[in-house]
Structures are given as C-alpha cells and as structure tokens.
Image: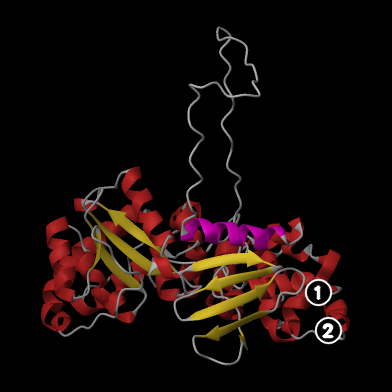
Amino acid sequence: MPAARLDARFKQDTLYVFAERETQLIRAWPDLTAVRKRNRAVRWQGFEPDYPLIRPYRPTRKPKLRIDAASPQLTLDLVLPPDAPPPSAPRPRLTPAQRRKRAFDAFRFACPKPVARRVEPFRGDHLPLLRLLRALGERGDLFDTNPALGYCLALAFRDRLAARQPEREQWLDQLIELKQSEIMARLGLPASKRAVKAMAKIRPPSMSRELAAGLKRLLGDDAALQVMGHLPALNLGVLTLLLDPQLRALATPVLFEAVLAEPQETYFPFTARRLADIQQMADALGVDISRRRFRERNRIDALFEDLARDYTRLEDGRLAGCRFPPPPVSGTDSIVPLRTPQALVEEGRKQHNCVAGYAERVAGGDTYIYRVLAPQRATLSLVRWSGGGWQIGELLRAGNYPVSAATRRSVREWLENSRL
C-alpha cells in the first residue's frame, strides 16, 4: 500500500486509521472496541488490528542552551528594533509518518503505564492483550513473570474478552488464582516444571499465533526441553530450530547460544530458515548433510552459497516457469522489486551472491527481493515475520559485504513509511 494512503489521527478517545480501502476506529482504554468499514460499505464490522497498537515512545530531547560567558547579557525589549529579523516561518505540515506517530503515541498515553509497558514488547495481537489486562486489573503480574503464558491466555479467551459481559470476571477470577502449571494445563499445554520454566524464558517479541500453536508439541518434547533448560532465554530463532527435529540435529549447543545472542533472531528465525533452504537444496542435489554439525553461522552461509550455485544451474529450466506474486511493498526509483526468477538470477550474477536460491521462497509469498541502487548498490530481502508483517531480512553489497549506515537508514525509512 502506498505510504501516502496510510494515515492516522487520534481524537475523542479514538484512534482513526485511514487505509487504502477502509477506515478503522479503535477506541482507547478502557473501551477497547475496534470496528472497520470498507469503502462504500454500509455497516461497521468488528476486527482485530494486525499491527501493533502500543508503540515505543522516545521523547525528542531538546538541545541544551549554550551560553557564552563572553557574550553580553541577554536583554528583553518590548518593542522590536527596526532592523529586527522577520518572524520565523510557520511550522511545516506534518508528514503522514509523523501524523501516524503522534496518533499512536496518544493511544499509548491513554493506557495506564503498567499496561503499556507489558504490551509494548509483543509484536502483534495487542488488542486481545489489552483486553486481558483490562479484565485482570491489578492482577497483571503474570505478564511480568511469564509473559508468553499471558499471551497464550489472551489468545485462548479473546472472544470472551471482547464480549462486554459482567460474568467474564468470575471465570477469570478463578483462573488467575491457579498456579502457572495449572493455567498451562487448562490451556492444553504440557504442565511439567520444565515446561513452565521454558515458557517463562520466551521473549515476548518472539511470540505469535503460529508459535503458540506449536508450543504444545515443543514443550512436550524431552529433547527440546533439555536444550531449553541450558539456555538463559528463548527467542524465535532457537524455538524454530527446536520445532524441526531435522534442523535441530544439525545444530550444536554453541550454535544455539549464537542464535540466542543475535538480536534479529528474536523477530525472525534467520538461521533456521537458512538451514531449511540448505536441506531442500541438498535433497534436490543428492547431497547428504545429515552428519553435519554447525557451530557458526558463517559455516552455514558458506555451505548455502556452494549449494545455491549448483542448485540454480540444476533448476534453471524449472525456475523459468516459476511465478512471483506482486511485491508486498511498492518500490521506488532506487529500491526496485525483482518480479521474475530471471531478474533474481541476474541480480545474483551481478552482485556475486546466492540470491537466486530464494526463488521458491519468493514464489511462496514469505520473502521478496529488491535491487537497491542508492545510496549504495545492494541487494535487499524482505521477509514476512510470523505476525504477518514484513521486515528487513538481509541488506548486503556485492559479495555479501555490509552496507553503510546511511544505506540501512534509507531502506528502513522507506519500509517504515510504507506501513502502519
């Protein structure tokens, strides 16, 4: 959706979001109702936003006034002298991005500070989380000790929390008084001590509906619990590796620690995805990697590049018939989406990288590749995170060398201006 068609306002305790073909109204705390209406539709319909409502707020620091001791003392005159400069020009109008930020900041400020602090780390499903915390009142400390369990609780009862019924407090009173293991059992999750401890280690930004759906299998796997027991925390990268026994067998304890230490793995399982691509290409090429054990990400990347070259040659004929979906974010003169497998292969040859190995992921709709022409020549991959939004995957110059801070900032601003 073009950035110019995304806008937001906050007035009369309501967040108004204007998208390309619909208008959304989200009432602020404590009402928390959300409705939307498509263009030309007659009725408003309830919905849950697929974007975060509670955004990080960082006030802009005003520069400190520097006083020169040698300068004359400041005096105030009621009448301006004839040679006084003209009054300053009026403030420029806010951009759509600035208006969105101001609107979402106001929505956040309408919430109690403890509530906003508990919801902000999660990347999605903010409305069910806010409604659960509204119902819990002063009993929201579950989100301090086991935020992932609080997230699962909000998802499991989101329909009941959305309905404004007085009796909802009674069932919640009974539930919240239970031990965490008993709450997990009520949710159909394994309730062993190790499972509860593992659940409490999951970082809130890693939680999603897809991950929550896999927790029953993961927390009931003794081998996975053993790995989780040796790690101080758990992110999406680690959990995705553990969910797939075939990928788990390729990883060593050192690799799990490296994945946990990588900030981006909190939001997207880059290492697990790379290993899955390697496994797919190795199977197609008849290469046995089952005995490999990886300790470092650079070894994984090197193997990926080796396999991708042979895989691209092998699959040239099939890739010619591959169809890519439309790009998730519109391009610009300097950030150009690669819409065909042929463009992908050509980009890999020009930039000396293995981007052609992503053809199937692009066709599958969870990755998209762009050619970046300025400030530097680079290749960009956007990846769909588990909450449904798109984020920067890799942004590298030719030969997989890192880009400058200016290039990364330019691409990040382009992406931020294209979404809510």
Count of number-bearing discs: 2
Q: Residues within 10 Å of mark 1 (few under 14, many from 20)?
A: some
Q: Could you tell me residue 351's position as x and y percent?
A: 16, 56
Relative to residue 107, is residue 20 drawn left or right? left
The front one of 19 and 345 is: 19
Image quadrant of residue 311?
bottom left
Can residue 256 be seen here?
no
Task: Give the quadrant of the N terminus.
Answer: bottom left
Mark 1 and 2 residues: CB-CB less than 8 Å, in contact? yes
The residue under label 2 is 168
Residue under the point 68% across and 68% down: 194
The residue under label 1 is 135
Residue under the point 51% across and 60% down: 266
Sequence-first disc among 1 and 2? 1
| Magenta highlight range | 96-109
Give me the disc on residue 148: none
Up the image or down, 42 lies above or below 247; here it is below
Relative to residue 304, is residue 169 drawn left or right? right
